[in-house]
Amino acid sequence: MIGEQNVRRRFIQRREAPYDFIEVTESYSPEAPNSDRYLWSDGGYDGLRATDGTDISSRTKHREYMKANGLTTVDDFQKTWDKAAQQRAEYYTEGPRKEVRQDLLKTIEQLQNRRK
């Protein structure tokens, strides 16, 4: 009995419901988190199919499919969108106010003529 009081016990809490504690051995080591697998492997492509049913379940297959069909991903347009946003900002802050005013007046006039 006396020796049992000095026994060290180790518990971990479950990650899923019911979130209770379970006893583990001293040699227990938790599983590595699975969240990084999408960065370092093709895990995000598992079972992936294009809308036409083509298998694109790896990065290589996906890249080949995109190239063969003349497609691209949204990240290819980041610089284009940044440049367009800058041009819009310049237009509305420094741009031709007279043209904007004329466009607004023309639109208002068209809307008013519809009501009549």
Image (cartoon, grey):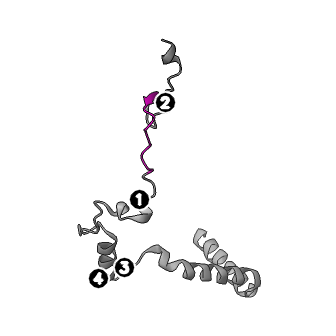
Is 58 placed above or below 19 here?
below
Q: Is residue 70 magenta?
A: no
Amino acid type for the residue under numbered disc 3: Leu
Q: Quadrant of residue 94?
A: bottom right
* Label located before the other in sequence (1 or 4): 1
Amino acid type for the residue under numbered disc 2: Phe
Residue at position x 56%, y 81% in the image: 79
Contact between marks 1 and 2 (CB within 8 A): the answer is no
Q: Quadrant of residue 88?
A: bottom right
Q: CA distance from mark 4 to mark 2?
A: 54 Å
Main secondary structure along the magenta-highlighted residues: loop
Amino acid type for the residue under numbered disc 4: Ala
* Label located before the other in sequence (3 or 1): 1
Disc 2 designates what residue?
11
Residue 105 in the image: state x and y as whole percent: 69, 79
Between 39 and 10, the residue placed more toward the observer is 10
Disc 4 designates what residue?
68
Residue 41 in the image: state x and y as whole percent: 38, 64
Residue 101 in the image: state x and y as whole percent: 73, 81
Residue at position x 40%, y 78% in the image: 72
Is 23 placed above or below 42 here?
above
Disc assigned to residue 71? 3
Q: Which residues are magenta?
A: 20-33
